[in-house]
Image (tube, rainbow, N blue to C red):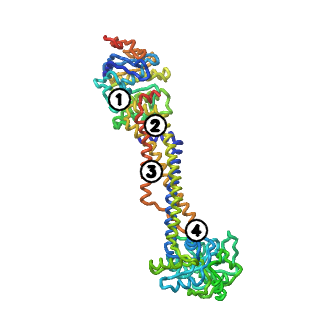
Amino acid sequence: MIRFVLADLRRLWAGALVVCLLVALSTALGVAVTLQERALRLGSARAADKFDLVIGAAGSETQLVLSSVFLQPSPLPLLPGAVLAGLQTDPRVEWAAPVAFGDSFAGYPIVGTTTRLIAATTPGFAEGKMFTHEGEALVGADVALKTGDTVKPMHGTAAEGGHTHGELAYHVVGRLKATGTAWDRAILVPVQAVWHIHGLGEEHEDDHDRAQDGAAHEEHDDGHDDHDHHGHIDPDAPISEQFDAEDPGVPAILVKPKTIAAAYKLRQDYRNDRTLGVFPGEVLTKLYATLGDAKLVLSLVAAGAQVLVAGALLLVTVVHIGQRRKQIGALRAFGAPRLSVFLIVWLELFSLFLTGIGLGVGLGYGAARAISQAVKQGNGFDLPVEFLHQDAWQIGVMLMFAALLSALPAWLAYRQSPVAALRS
Amino acid sequence: MALTLDDVSVRYADMAKPVLTIASLDLPAGGRLAITGGSGSGKSTLVNVITGLERLRQGHVRWNGTDLAGLSEGARDRFRAAHIGLVMQDFHLFPGLSALDNILLPARLSRVATPDCVARAHGLMGRFGLERPQQPVETMSRGEMQRVAVARAVLRKPGVIIADEPTASLDVEAGAAVADLLLDLVETEGSTLVVVSHDARLVERLPRRIELKNGEIVHDTAGSHKPAGGDA
């Protein structure tokens, strides 16, 4: 029987190939949507894992999380320096660290922060050591720089037409181990250096005035309002991570609360008309809800494509069975049991579905992996493509559906009168 | 196998008259019968009835006493597979399969393709002058194809061989070769042979001939049939 089916498929290879490809493509669409949506949820959840509480100036929650957790460049209003100072001395806070961004080098974002944040959110060093001076920088695992290289920061990004501080440079002193987050593509420098490079924080009086004037409303527009305030850094100056109210503003502060209760209290305290406290996980959950709708739409499109393909194949098969009535009638005339005829037709169609679904799962997985790889290269954070048990169930359901669908033309062949078939 | 038809009538819903009416017909085991008649005379219907392809609603068709009219469709399939070798004008070989696979296909589908059966298939091919068992059937001449079809029909040593226009699509030489094959086979294996044919050369080689017209036997060289509706 297998030999007969294989011979038939070989003979009709072009049609069989088209059927397989149609099934494979429609399956791949569904598989890729499912895997990629899950990868996005898993990847973003893992990226936000170390970010318990983020505090920024009043504005968009989503933008604050995208900019601080995923390092997406965006103009964010600055928090007054007093906020960071207050958090550092807050008894409910284990540690609080500034996250200052806006500059870049060779397409990599430069993030000003503290040694405490780096120690607490990364798995350690692949090589080199922590920065200890203003002119030193660390690179994430995916940054194509090595220890000893020079980093000349550019305001904003090259795409935005930013300009480079040609006279200022950091030296790479260490490379961090991979975290699987956007921070793997970041160049980390002391926040103090970011301030100084923009001419901030050197004159507390000036900064104090700025804060008093409402620094929270100042646009941190990637090019910074301080474009023209070119400062300088002293590469050998030691860094200080004790902040006070007169320090310049920062776009975001990452906070590690001591307890869960403290986290909620802090978030509540910092949700006012000047500041915004968010749990990145909570913001992502809201995003997932939106993504969930998108996934539903995409899944329905994929399912619709599968149903259309299944329907078209069924039609083709029924027509095909009609055209092969004589062959089926002859099989019966020569004594082939009806069940054998049923199995031949069923097996022939089901094997096409099976091959197509198998190919489609592979194609869908490959497509999801390719998308994840592209995102990883572009944004630095992992989108883990994983199969779960529920996927096996879904594939099982598809195979069951394919088996049932294949049974319809097989049933028609089973019911076919050999005399009528031979006479046709 | 001996054939007995009794009070057979085949009627289709959209036709006023029965397409086949045979009050009585007997053929002893090992007998050889030729059926002739014009187009629409009922020859194919008679073949369908005696092979069990057509379900009989009136009358009886008995092979060695087994009444096909009393068998279910599945049972008729099994009976046909075991006892009747069918040879048709159009060969009905399956492209993509070799000659040997075509010969073995019905036996394989019925799960009776034992090593003995395979050995017999090889033996039949040699006997029929088919030298290449693995040759794809679509590359064969029509005469070779019909020989493959005959080998397939007799693989399981059926008690009866029914050939429906076995030489009609062959040239004279190939037709004569196939006719020789059939007659040799029934001679050596003792099978009953029923041939439907327009081929006078083939028909004349069979000892008994009946002619059908409008679904009725109008001539029987044995003179033993009862006219439809008759009492004789």
Q: Same chain for marks 1 and 3?
A: no
Q: Mark 4 highlights which residue?
A: A379
Q: Residues within 10 Å of mark 4 (few under 14, many from 20)?
A: some
Residue A293 relative to residue A152: left or right: left
Residue, disc 1: B80
| Camera-side mark, 2 or 1 | 1
**Image quadrant occupied by the N terminus of chain B:** top left
Distance of label 1 from label 3 (alpha carbons) = 39 Å
Mark 1, Cα crowd under 10 Å, few <14 / some 14-19 / many 20+, is many
- Tell us which disc is closer to us: 4 or 2: 4
The amino acid pointed to by label 1 is Arg
- The three-letter code of the residue at mark 2 reads Leu
- Given residues A332 and B104, the one toward you in this image is A332
Real-space CA distance between mark 3 and mark 2, rounded to the nearest whole angstrom: 32 Å
Q: Secondary structure at mark 4?
A: helix
Mark 4 or mark 3: which comes first in sequence? Answer: 4
Query: Do the dots labelled 3 and 2 sit on one chain?
Result: no
Helix, strand or loop at disc 3? helix
| Residue B97: mark | 2
| Chain of the residue on which disc 2 is drawn | B
Q: Residue at x 68, y 70 (%)?
A: A160
Farthest-out residue, left: B65
Instruction: Calculate the distance from the C-alpha at mark 2 to the C-alpha at mark 1.
Output: 23 Å
Residue found 33% across the figure and 28% down from its top: B83
Callout 2 crowding tier (Cα within 10 Å): few <14, some 14–19, many ≥20: many
The image's mark for residue A398 is 3
Q: Chain of mark 4?
A: A
* The C terminus of chain B lies in quadrant: top left
Q: Residue B54 falls in which quadrant of the image?
A: top left
Tell me how far mark 4 sits from mark 2, CA to CA.
56 Å
